[in-house]
Image (cartoon, coloured by chain):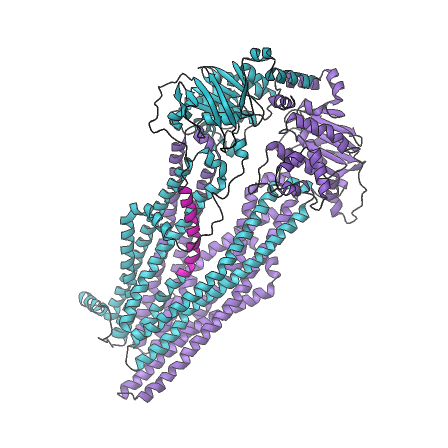
Amino acid sequence: MKVLLRLTPYIKQHIWAFSFGLFGLLGARIFEALIPLYVKMGIDNIMAAQSANETGDILSPESIAIAQTTLVYPALAICACVVAQMVVTIISRILIRRIGIYAAFDIRNQLYGHMQRQGPAFFAKFSIGDLMARAINDVSLIRQFLAGTTRLTSVLVFTAVVGLGFMFSLSAQLALIVILPLPVISVVAWIYSKHIYKQSHIVQEGFSRLSTFVQENLNGIRTVQAMAQEQDEVRRFGMVNDEFAQHNQTLFITNSALSAWMPILAATATLIILGYGSHLVTTGEITLGTFAAFFSYLALLLWPVREAGAMVTQWQRGASGTQRVFEVLDYEPEIRDYASEDSANPEFPELTGKVSVRHLYYQYVDKNKYALEDINFDVEPGETIAILGRVGSGKSTLLRLFVRLIDPVKGDILLDGHPINGFPLDFLRHQVCLVLQDPFLFADSLGDNIAYDRPDRDVSDIWESADAAALRETIENFPEGLQTILGERGVTLSGGQKQRTALARGLVRMTPLLILDDCFSAVDTETEEHILSGLKSVRQNLTTLLVSHRVSTARHADRIIVLDEGKIVEMGSHQALLESNGFYADLEKAQRVKGGMLDQIESDEAKI
Amino acid sequence: MNATQKKLDHSIFDADIHGQAMNFQYLKRIMAWVKPHALLVCTSILLVVLASLLAVFLPVIITRVAIDTIILDTPDALMPDFGMNSVNEWLMHLTGFEGIVTVCILYGVTTIACHGLYHLHRVTFAKTVLFALRDMRLDLFSHMEHRPSSFYDKVAVGRVMTRITNDVQALFELLMGVGMLIGEFVPFFLALALMLTIDVELTGYLLLSIPIFGVITYFFRLATRKVYRQIRNTVSQLNQNLQENLSGMQVVQLSNREERNLQVYSDINEKNSKQEVHAIQLETGYGAFMDNMVNLALAVIIWVGGSAVLSDAITLGSVILFTQFIDMFIRPIRVLGMQYNILFRAMASAERIFQALDWHEQIREPKTPVRLPGRVKGKLEFKNLTFGYDDNQPVLKDVSFNVKPGEKLAIVGPTGSGKSTLIRLLGRFYDFSDDRIFLDGHDLNSIHSTEVRRRIGVVMQDFHIFSGSILENIVLGNQSITRAAAISAAKSVNAHEFIEALPDGYDTELVERGQNLSQGQRQLLAFARVLASDPEILILDEATASIDTETEQLIQEALEHLMQGRTSILIAHRLQTIETADRVLVLKDGKVKELGTHQELMALRGVYYTLTQLQFQDVSS
């Protein structure tokens, strides 16, 4: 509950609208509570005229008309109250509900900006689905809390206060007894709403189980059909489906029971008015109008009494939503942008691509072994270096350190002699480009995907990089060329085409240092050859690091660094390493004989 | 490959159905699922009528009996009391209590009975709706489960999924809404009838308000429809943007796109906020207006009714009775206004559901299927098979070859040569001409597809791993496979060792797509799955992804075990795999280029020879 206090800044921004809104809601309650008063006045006026009637036997039409005029005032007053209440309610509701919308707007933007500054540890802790849920459902819980719960709570409080006030001012005697059953109603409502909350949670879970089942089943429909398991899947779905219906039924029964109990319990208060009130009427202590007005005020009061419990749940929901959102917002980014945080913010010239790695260590949080251990090497500007190693040898970890997706435990990476964490983060990432193994493309046009870092790039630059990534033919095959939209609503590229697009996205930037993380795995060997041999001329005097576990890729580099279990085991040119007959030579032999991929045959066949 | 790369056809299963307010055709079709529960529905409606009758009596007891008769002592015989006064007198006579006591008893008992009946009505109605939609959802699921691959090539899985989940859920809201309307309109008509018997003129004034409400509601709906659609639009844009940005976060950060992306997001966010504000302005105005109409009606009753009392046209009790009925009178109109939105959404959902149910595309099954013996020999013959996904684009051209029982055949060929298509046809996933493929001399099309798939086990490249335990993934719902059989299958394909090393062994839960397993382990698991189902013919589309050398060795061993005593067709990507085969078939551009043993093809010095030669030269140069 305390966490709700963190929402105060969002209210404070609109403190005037909020106060006005609350004040208006109070006003509206008063206008509303005046209405039964005028109904009472009308009834009492009729009674007075009737008793006059009894004494004077038959009323002349004139005196009826006079008596009728006494009804004009209460009728008009009711109309006035209704209109006033309506106008005030509309204005104040809009004022308050808008604050919820504005807060949701701010929080969404904050979350978005905050998540963009996060690194792998954050995304390991929060899955994308989880973050989506927080940004969508929990933000809307906050919105509901600010727009609905605060308003409803104040309305309930005002209604209760005003209703009770009027009741007591009419007849304290009757009011005291009438309110006796009200706490019982509150407690019953509260107990039920807890049950309902729990059960609706179960129903929600059931629904998501249902959705997950369907989603998985449909994703694997070919497997299901290939194994001829359709009937069995239908049977299993039937169970999940049935369970969902059962849970739903339980929820509805509870819900309906609450709806039944409320009026029954409220009837006790009605009975009190009926029994004790009628006694007071006969003894002349209250008028018949007061008697009738009590029914109206009771109806007014029942609403906050009934909702009191649900209100508690709503506050809890608001609190849990707030807590989940701030859990994300409070997460400190693991990669700190020291240079930008520093007010001095030094300027750096364009880098040359000279790399020095000094005693570099990296360890994953959940592991008790170094992923990288005492890595040292130097790269001269313009060199192409291949990093080779088996799965899990630490290649990708090493590359991620260069762009500060992660920070080392010990040691330094120096670019042009400066340690990289001395650069502002955006400067570093302007100078060093990493192309990831998994070619993530956006549901945007091909051209925008290639020029992702700067959408205003020249088309000629885009085509140049497309050429270098052997992508021209693919693009030209689409009728819309660079404007072809990718993704669900557009074309789906093959794995190789995706990798080449991601490659073009890296190449177009012409950064002093380009790092390719095994981004040829889905590209056939011939095309890979073609790209790699072209790379040298495209990136003249620019440094390139490329990772692979294929010898055929590595041998294109000037030098090869062989990593194994986080350590550098060999370093040198292709020829030199073959001659030294070590790890690299073994790997080459193994790949030649055993794992020779027939893709290579296929592509070479195309040449024939 | 070809099929999955095909552009999804969105016109067939369109997500952008906006629906219309009412389509009785759909309601009629929905009734097919409600019909089996007809008795329950009738009971439910009977209950609501009874409950509403009692609900109408409640204010009568207060006004006519308590106020007019007991407190004021003016029982006016001309005004209706629906026998309530007599009931009360009978109670007084029976118990010997005073009138005020018995009227309290009467009121209490009626209240309990009334709301008890309402409760039963709601429960029975909800039960009907829940059962009907449960059955509908099951039918829909079953229907989708039997659509062929050619259907799933064209339609995104997400589209089908929302029909089964969300769209059926929307119908739930619709039907519950119908129930709610019944629950509101029964007391409305009863109240109306009573009010007419009391005072026609006064009732007439109140009835006048209905068209006013109707018109206002109509315009409100008109205005909000547009805004709601806009909001739905921007919300889905927001979610899409967020999802995409999160998925591609590393690329975003590495491209220094953070600020630009935030700006794009913020722009949509702002647009959404403006629409939301617009919507709440409309909603608040409408809601407040409708809420206060009840009170305006009160003014009318005081004025018109009060005057009538003065001229002795009606009793004061009747006027108070009117003020009590007013809520019953106005509520259904408000409920109707609230339900309108749901109705609208539900109609669009109904359209989507029936569109799916009416999609009857399926694999052609033989009228009199051939019954295969307990075990087939596994002889396969292909005779001049030509096939294309589109009629004018053949993927396989005049393919003919035979596979002897127990033979191992490797198929080699470049991407797009038709290898994958060939195995899809063998699994009867697509329709093709008769008398082209024969299993033990029977035309494949004369055998039921389920039967074919039971005999021919396919290990696909993108085999699917379901969330569930390892064991469940091996057994895959086939209840004839015991735990022991599954474990022995896993042992045979070298999967036992890594499975036992997992925290809960065979009961280890796998996340969807088996992301907690390595590529090689997934392959072994797929082997275990196919071995456990013990097909006579094995088809394997070898995974291309790189696997470490040790696992590679395990896979090769497993494969040999798997192929033992089975006719096997391997789509091979590795030389080593080819070498385990008896014969090799070279496929290119959908045509058979060469067929023979490794030695024969080498001796032939044709395409295959050149390929292998190039391979070795290439690497060692």
Q: Position of residue A293 (x, y in %)?
A: 37, 73
Looking at the picture, does residue B533 appear above or below residue A497?
Answer: above
Front-most of residues B459 and B110 = B459
Front-most of residues B120 and B291 = B291
Looking at the picture, does residue A240 appear above or below residue A547?
Answer: below
Looking at the picture, does residue B502 appear above or below residue A88?
Answer: above
Please count the marks in the image: 0
| Identity of the residue drawn at 70% across and 40% down | A462
Q: Is residue B259 left or right of residue B81?
A: right
The image quadrant where one finds the C terminus of chain A is: top right
Q: Position of residue A125 (x, y in %)?
A: 59, 40
Front-most of residues A285 and A563 = A563
The picture quadrant where one finds residue B593 is: top right
Q: Is residue A183 left or right of residue A321?
A: left
Q: Is residue A148 left or right of residue B295?
A: right
**Residue A177 shows in this picture:** yes
Asked if residue B548 is among those painted magenta in the image, a careful observer would answer no
Q: Main secondary structure of the magenta part?
A: helix
| Identity of the residue drawn at 57% across and 60% down | A99
Front-most of residues B496 and B616 = B616
In the image, which residues are magenta? B336-357
Asked if residue B342 is among those painted magenta in the image, a careful observer would answer yes
Q: Position of residue B560 (x, y in %)?
A: 51, 16
Q: Colour of chain A?
A: purple
Looking at the picture, does residue A416 appear above or below residue A281?
Answer: above
**Residue A287 shows in this picture:** no
Q: Position of residue A589 (x, y in %)?
A: 66, 16
Q: Colour of chain B?
A: cyan
| Identity of the residue drawn at 59% across and 33% down | A494
